[in-house]
Image (cartoon, rainbow, N blue to C red):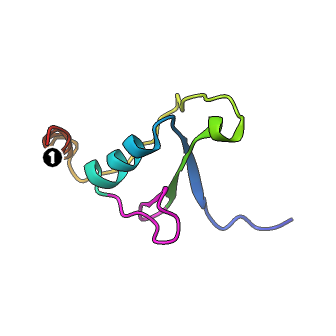
Amino acid sequence: MPRVERVDFVSVPTRDIARARRFYGEILGLPSNRDTPDEFETPNVTLALWQPEAEAVAFTPNTAGIALRVDSVEAARNELQARATC
């Protein structure tokens, strides 16, 4: 049995890839993978955008969500709201 080293990536289903790229790249400020622009890097896991319908798979949104840790939730919320309105 192979030993699991870590979580490599989490798929993020989306219907609007351009909007998702803007959110993860511009609003959250996550760096995209230089080889795969639909993947965004965090310190411990890659978030991989995925359009299921482009592969003839029914779209189902992620209802569990993704939790990203920050130093201050209030400061992060204020900064994200400011970025989102620009």
Quadrant (top left, top right, bottom left, bottom right) of the C terminus: top left
In the image, residue 69 lies at what x, y percent? 34, 50
Residue lying at 20% horizontally and 43% vertically, measured from the top left: 80
Q: Which residues are magenta?
A: 30-44
10 lies left or right of 3:
left
- Tell me residue 33's x, y (percent): 46, 67
Residue placed under numbered mark 1 in the picture: 79
Q: Quadrant of residue 84?
A: top left
**Residue drawn at point x = 46 percent, y = 37 percent:** 16
Task: Provide residue 78's location: percent of width, then percent of height.
Answer: 14, 41
What predominant SS class does the magenta segment belong to? loop
Q: Give percent across and percent down for residue 61.
A: 54, 29
Q: Nearer the viewer, residue 53 or 67?
A: 53
Q: How many marks?
A: 1
3 or 21, which lies in front? 21
Is 8 situated left or right of 57 in this image? left
| Front-lying residue, 11 or 67 | 11
**Does the magenta portion include 68?**
no
Q: Is residue 33 magenta?
A: yes
- 62 sits left or right of 29 in the view: right
Front one among 8 and 52: 52
Residue at x-position 72% and y-position 35%: 56
Decide: few, some or many residues near mark 1? Use Cα within 10 Å; few <14, some 14-19, many ≥20: few
Q: Which residue occupies the extreme right position in the image?
A: 1
Rendered-image quadrant of the N terminus: bottom right
Q: Amino acid at mark 1?
A: Glu
- Residue 5, by quadrant, is bottom right
